[in-house]
Image (cartoon, helix red, strand yellow):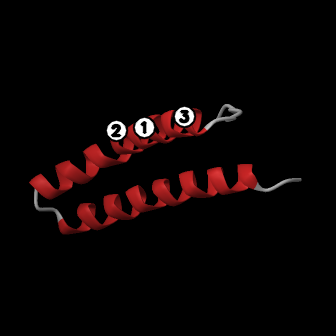
Amino acid sequence: MDSVEITTRSEFAMWAIQRAQEIVMNEGSALALAARDMDETALQDNGVALGKAIADAMLEVFDGLISE
């Protein structure tokens, strides 16, 4: 993943929107298909993957806030 320097709230908002779109595009479509097919196992697995992607994005931001 590329490193991005965010210096304003506006830049952070744009980054967050773009990151959320990527997560939903990558993980959300599989979740929607599992729901449509009423596949409980796939629904659970894809729900976990979506949650993990969200948590990873939050940790990515948090790690960027910590001074080294």
Which residue shows up at 64% across the image and 35% down it? 8
29 or 66, which is in the foreground? 66
- Identify residue for label 1: 22
**Label 1 – label 2 distance at C-alpha:** 5 Å
Query: Residue 16: percent from the left, percent from the top?
Result: 49, 42
SS class, disc 2: helix
Amino acid type at image mark 3: Ser
Which residue shows up at 30% across the image and 48% down it? 28
- Identify residue for label 2: 25
Amino acid type at image mark 1: Glu
Against 25, residue 38 (above or below) is below
Against 45, residue 22 (above or below) is above
Are discs 3 and 2 less than 8 Å apart at CB?
no
SS class, disc 3: helix
Query: Residue 34: percent from the left, percent from the top?
Result: 19, 55
Task: Judge depth for marks 3 and 2 and give the one in front.
Answer: 3
SS class, disc 1: helix
**Label 1 – label 3 distance at C-alpha:** 19 Å
Query: Residue 7: percent from the left, percent from the top?
Result: 69, 35
Q: Earlier in the sequence, mark 3 or mark 2?
A: 3
Q: Earlier in the sequence, mark 1 or mark 3?
A: 3
Query: Residue 41: percent from the left, percent from the top?
Result: 25, 67
User: The N terminus lies in which quarter of the figure?
Assistant: top right
Tag of residue 10 = 3
38 or 54, which is in the foreground? 54
Amino acid type at image mark 2: Met
59 lies left or right of 28:
right
Q: Residues within 10 Å of mark 3 (few under 14, many from 20)?
A: few
**Label 3 – label 2 distance at C-alpha:** 23 Å
Against 64, residue 19 (above or below) is above
Total marks placed: 3
Are discs 1 and 2 less than 8 Å apart at CB?
yes
